[in-house]
Image (spheres, rainbow, N blue to C red):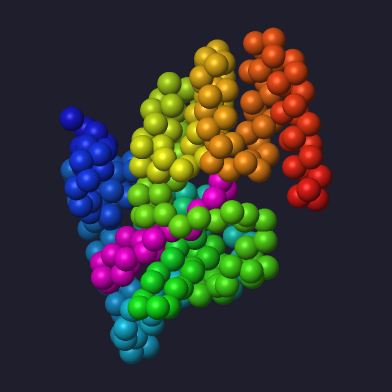
Amino acid sequence: MTLEDKLMDDVRNGKQIDIERALLIASGCETEEKVSEYKTKLNEIEKQFHGYASARNVQGEVETAKALHEFLWLGKIEEDYVRECSNLVDMIEVIMHSQTMGEGDCVGLSSLLGALGARQGLEFTVLYNTIHVLSRLRVGEKVIDIETISPIGFDIPTHHSLLEGYKGLREGKVTALIASLYCLKGVAKRRLGRFEEAIRDYDKAIELNPDSAAAYNNRGVAKYYLGRLEEAIADYSKAIEIVPYYTLSYANRSMPKSALGDIEGCKEDVRIYRQLLRNAA
């Protein structure tokens, strides 16, 4: 049994999962040796954070969370960085080799925040939609949302201009973040033409987060390329059921419908797709 298989079994059986370990496995650590290697690297990063927090006399959950977010952005003053790190392993490597924070995308940075936060006793949930992930911390009655891809993203209000275009954010457990990691792995494999492998990653993402419209949509794309047209339509339809304004899924669904001879269904999907584009303009 692989580490991924064991992780998925634990999720199915409702067992308590080690968030850091789960994030590392979903980020590509396939052996216990690799998990240990990156836990050791996280130890070094945590030491850096403790030095940062100690120098600022950080106390309490809110201050700790704020300090962690600031720590992600050490040495960075611009927001127009290259966001290439989309998982925890990549984030660790960047920090260990360049000492530069703030180089990841929303999933990579949220994974690092979640892993380091868990070590400080912080329990983050996530806000997510089809294209974006934020972190959320609840301390008593206070709710703190953290836009990790911006240095001014701590305790960001949902109406802030930084969140324009991120429609329909919903809150999920940290397993939704792990699901996002598997979804991104699937996208990378799909782009390499490894469609069956991609589907297996999307399956994991859906099992971890059954409300992941992005995983259903992307699985539909992989099935479409494999000629599994009816299954692709079913996945696109599920994505639309979860997110009725999911523009891309309407466009995607129109193609297998056309290929199967459902011309009216294809035209209707194209009509809705265009209408959604006009509404978003």
* Magenta-drawn stretch contains 216: no
The residue positioned 28% from the left and 48% from the top of the image is 22
Q: Which part of the image, by quadrant, shows the N terminus?
A: top left
Residue 138 visible in this rendered orientation of the protein: yes
Depth order, front residue of 105/244: 244
Q: Is residue 62 above or below residue 56?
A: above
Percent of width and height locating residue 124: 37, 64
| Residue 257: quadrant of the picture | top right
Number of numbered callouts drawn: 0
State yes or no: residue 114 in magenta. Answer: yes
What residue is rendered at 47% in x and 53% in y? 107
Q: Nearer the viewer, residue 10 or 275?
A: 275
Q: Which residue occupies the foreground of this view, 82 or 121?
A: 121
The picture places residue 20, in percent across and down from the top left corner, at 28, 55
Q: Residue at x 49, y 69 (%)?
A: 145
Can you see residue 188? no
Q: Is residue 174 above or below residue 154?
A: above
Residue at 67%, 61% (x, y): give it.
Answer: 164
On the image, which quarter does residue 232 sit in?
Answer: top right
Specify whether 156 is left or right of 89: right
**What range of the chain is rendered magenta?**
111-131
Drawn side of residue 40 relative to residue 137, left or right: left
Hey, which quadrant is residue 206 in on the image? Answer: top left
Tell which residue pokes out farthest to the top in this image.
261
Q: Nearer the viewer, residue 279 or 52?
A: 279
Q: Is residue 153 above or below residue 224?
A: below
Q: What x and y, as percent, mark residue 133?
A: 50, 55
Task: Report the residue that reaches farthest toward the bottom.
Answer: 57
